[in-house]
């Protein structure tokens, strides 16, 4: 055990993203942005304790985002600037001569390799700051014109920025005493003339600042990868019941038997949606032993399922109804319209086929339906 600590700064706002909530609380890969780096520290054997610094009024939300993470022992109110916030985080930790990694909560893709390198560099050299060589040429505005600094001598710094806790705290306190404002932690040491050692950062260790960063982060975390679910259902044909398919009542003398309105097409679609989101199946959600669902419209069940799919976008639904009779072609447009109204923004396809007289569907004993649904994270 190295006994290192971490301070994760999560007190910023999402102003440049235009988000209504703190950007570190936005969902990414099925969990808040902040939780990604907290888990990296939680799982790293070199790190013992983490202080999370948040805006006053947001600490409960940050605690919730860190639920179950044993190393996140301190939740500290930030100050008016990053400098104040880091200082509050450093002060919350037990004062020891151990490495402390200061990290931006808006950098979710913190690798175990980078944590190890920063900690090792502190033990060996007293500091370890994640940085990258520049790939873009930089221009400096100078008076009327521009100059081009030698790119090979420039570095972009990221976080973690790691130092011995006692030394960094002293440097921060000196900066405050001198009324000096800092944009990063290394700056506090540099102004005291202390050597700052750089370690190789990661190109993927991006800071979510603008909309394009969030898009890149969503791509990296797999949020933009579509997932598919499939559903299948069968109901028996009988007399004395209406035939409802995709929420449309089809005139005729036969209907489907079931606890609800027995809309076999919507049942298959519901199972496809639930399957894509790994949320179980229709029987588990709406058991046919529950009198609450007796005679219920399956379109109402579909509405309730879409409510459960918060955090998901339904991209596409394709339903195939397998029936020998009645003839469904005249009702296709209505069925597509009905499902489209229930699934706004989703491309809907409804198809029908017979089985050439074969099997239970061919003999007119029942109707089957299958569906495929494609979802991605909202
Ligand atoms: Mg069913």
Image (cartoon, rainbow, N blue to C red):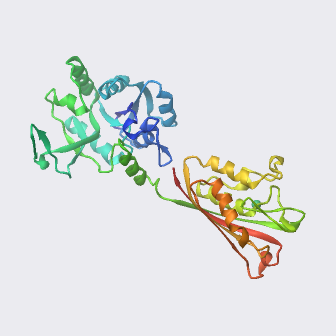
In the picture as drawn, the residue positioned furthest to the top comes out as 177
Q: Position of residue 162 (x, y in %)?
A: 27, 36
Q: Name which residue lies at 16% across and 27% down.
A: 191
Q: Quick check: 41 above or below 60?
A: below
Indicate the quadrant where residue 149 lies.
Answer: top left
- Going by the image, does 150 lie left or right of 57? left
Q: Residue at x 24, y 28 (%)?
A: 182
Q: Quarter containing ligand 1?
A: bottom right
Q: Nearer the viewer, residue 349 or 329?
A: 329
Quadrant showing the N terminus:
top left
- In this view, the residue farthest toward the right is 240
Q: Position of residue 274 (x, y in %)?
A: 64, 55
Count of marks placed on residues: 0
Q: Is 259 on the left-hand or right-hand side of 36?
A: right
Location of residue 227 with respect to 41 vertically, above or below: below
The one of 67 and 43 positioned closer to us in this rendering:
67
At horizontal 74% and vertical 55% (from top left) the residue drawn is 298
Image-based side of 166 in relation to 273, left or right: left
At x 74%, y 82%, the residue is 356
Front-lying residue, 52 or 357: 357
Judge whether 92 appears above or below 118 on screen: above
Q: Position of residue 278 (x, y in %)?
A: 60, 54
Picture coordinates of residue 31 (x, y %)?
49, 44
Q: Which quadrant would residue 86 be assigned to in this image? A: top left
């Amino acid at each position: 055990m190295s006994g290192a600590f971490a301070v994760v700064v999560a007190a910023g706002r999402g102003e440049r993203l235009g988000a209504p909530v703190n950007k570190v609380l936005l969902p990414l890969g099925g969990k808040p942005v902040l939780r990604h780096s907290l888990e990296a520290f939680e799982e790293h054997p070199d790190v013992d304790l983490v202080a999370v610094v948040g805006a006053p009024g947001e600490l409960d939300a940050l605690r919730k985002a860190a639920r179950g993470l044993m190393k996140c022992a301190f939740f500290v109110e930030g100050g008016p600037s990053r400098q104040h916030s880091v200082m509050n985080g450093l002060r919350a930790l037990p004062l020891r001569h151990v490495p402390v990694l200061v990290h931006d909560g808006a950098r979710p893709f913190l690798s175990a390799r980078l944590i190890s390198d920063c900690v090792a560099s502190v033990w060996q050299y007293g500091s370890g700051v994640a940085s990258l060589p520049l790939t873009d040429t930089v221009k400096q505005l100078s008076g009327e014109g521009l100059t081009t600094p030698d790119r090979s001598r420039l570095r972009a710094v990221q976080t973690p920025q790691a130092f011995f806790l006692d030394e960094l705290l002293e440097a921060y306190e000196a900066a405050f005493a001198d009324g000096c404002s800092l944009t990063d932690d290394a700056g506090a040491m540099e102004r005291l003339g202390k050597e700052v050692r750089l370690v190789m950062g990661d190109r993927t260790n991006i800071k979510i600042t603008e909309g394009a960063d969030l898009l890149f982060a969503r791509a990296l975390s797999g949020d933009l990868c579509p997932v598919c679910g499939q559903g299948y259902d069968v109901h028996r044909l009988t007399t004395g019941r209406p035939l409802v398919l995709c929420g449309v009542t089809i005139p005729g003398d036969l209907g489907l038997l079931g606890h609800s309105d027995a809309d076999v097409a919507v049942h298959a679609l519901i199972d496809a949606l639930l399957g894509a989101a790994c949320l179980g199946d229709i029987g588990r959600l709406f058991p046919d032993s529950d009198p609450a669902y007796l005679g219920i419209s399956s379109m109402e069940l579909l509405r309730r399922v879409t409510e459960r799919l918060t955090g998901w976008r339904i991209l596409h639904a394709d339903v195939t109804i397998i029936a020998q009779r009645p003839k469904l072609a005249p009702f296709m447009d209505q069925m597509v319209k009905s499902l489209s109204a229930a699934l706004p923004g989703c491309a809907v396809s409804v198809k029908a086929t017979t089985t050439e007289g074969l099997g239970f569907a061919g003999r007119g004993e029942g109707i089957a339906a299958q569906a495929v649904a494609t979802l991605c994270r909202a």
